[in-house]
Amino acid sequence: MRSPPGVGWVRIVSAGLGSQVEGGWIFVKVLVLNCGSSSLKYQLIDMSDETLLAKGLVERIGIHGSRIKHVKVGMDPVVKETDIPNHDVAVKLVIDALLDLHHGVLKDLSELSAAGHRVVHGGERFTSSVLVDQEVLKGIEEVIPLAPLHNPANLMGIKAVMNALPGLPNVAVFDTAFHQTMPPHAYMYGIPYEHYQVDRVRRYGFHGTSHFYVAHRVAQVMNRPVEQLKIVTCHLGNGSSITAVDGGKSVDTSLGYGTTEGILMGTRSGNLDPSVMIYLMEKYGDAKTVSDVVHKKSGVCGISGISSDMRDVEEAMEKGNERAKLAFDMLCYGIRKYIGAYAAAMGGLDAIVFTAGIGENSDLVREEVCKHLEFLGVKFDPSKNKVRGKEAELSAPDSRVKVFVIPTNEELVIARDTKELVLRG
Ligand code: AMP
């Protein structure tokens, strides 16, 4: 099964990721996969001590110019450009990379204990992670109408691993599962009840694995049981959502049926009066055009006219661009409104957590959001705010409500759930 050493790989010289810690293996190694329609992200984690061994990205699956980028922790990344027509070939390349003599991390496939898969939508059926069997595959397929872009790709990834590594246990971890604890008054829309019963239209929420991870991690950092805490978690990336986590459970979240509700995102609109959709559809004639508007042309990109990337927008704002400033203000105002609303929903607030690309890196967004929250008991300390991508407390010691940056780690949650379910059997 092994690739000849170094064949077809190009070395990329960079700083590398860190050093691999050797540990005794008991369970042990979990392959974590996150499949999109044309991409596949992977990590190999040693679950005896939760060490990341390798990670990578297969890009442009089924498209001209496909390639795999692989990183063995502690070494420079390597890239192989090759024809990758489908997910079966992509998974085989990942296995080859993991077994490669030079930049591989497995001597033998028997070291692999299980694979954990990110699945975007679990509907109302999947309220927690599950071991994959034929029934589960059918269940994920049944939810495709709720996530037509994501679930088919997630399924392709699971099936590709089943084909390439028969007998290896697979676990599905759902983005929506954490939010299944929302009460009906939070997840229902005010439209006729039949649309819930017949069409399954309700709020589901997304980024659940990330909200779960940072809420539990911040409780550890605060040295308090998560069951005693009221936390607002702000996952701010290309796609963003804010969640009210009361006693460790999601009780409300800003993304709903699909992925456009809530705050302004990279290219998605956030909250919109349905009348706007109706007006635009009547004027421009079809749902597809308006769907493109709210999913791909709106948000920070649509308002600023510059970019969906917050770094570009912040740079333009600092040079005096007014529309960039408007996009920034709309984003921060939206986040602040949700924090206030969720403090009211939970009847209190102990901590605010920022995570994902913008949350972990943008000191400007964090400051603009928090400096207006003093009335809630937030004493923000700007001198602690110049952090990027690291765990940090941003609030003053006497702040009643604590503010933290917690880098998210969805892959670790997937690997932990995978280990637990496989060991449980
Ligand atoms: P994610 O979807 O979590 O990967 O987040 C991606 C987004 O994070 C990018 O589109 C950027 O807008 C944002 N981001 C990353 N680094 C920074 C930074 N240094 N400052 C502001 N925004 C950033």
Image (cartoon, grey):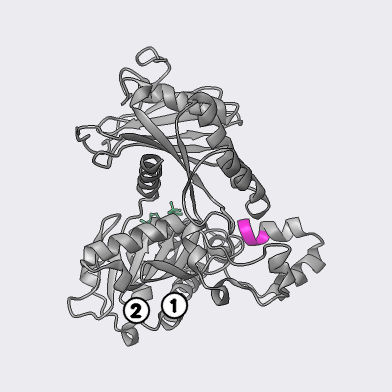
Quadrant of res 104: top left
Q: Is residue 225 left or right of 89 when viewed as pictured?
A: left
Q: What residue is disc 2 on?
A: 349
Q: Read off the magenta span.
A: 293-297
Which residue is drawn at the image coordinates 28% and 34% (left, top)?
73
Q: Is residue 251 left or right of 140 when viewed as pictured?
A: left
- Residue type marked 2: Leu
Q: Residue furthest top?
A: 4
Q: What residue is disc 1 on?
A: 342
Q: What secondary structure do most residues of the magenta stretch adopt?
A: helix
x then y, percent, for residue 193: 71, 73
- Residue type marked 1: Tyr
x then y, percent, for residue 98: 37, 25
Q: Quadrant of ligand 1?
A: bottom left
Q: Is residue 244 visible?
A: yes
Categorize mark 2 by other alpha carbons within 10 Å: few (<14), some (14-19), many (20+).
many
In-front residue for pair 31/269: 31
Q: What is the distance, in whole Å, between disc 2 and disc 1 at their CAs? A: 8 Å
Q: Are marks 2 and 1 in contact (CB under 8 Å)?
A: yes
Quadrant of res 157: top right
The correct choice, above or below, for 193 with respect to 152 in the image is: below
x then y, percent, for residue 206: 51, 59
Q: Is residue 390 left or right of 81 when viewed as pictured?
A: left
Q: Is residue 386 visible?
A: no
Which residue is drawn at the image coordinates 54% and 50% (left, top)?
120
In-front residue for pair 266/378: 378
Q: Residue furthest left?
A: 397
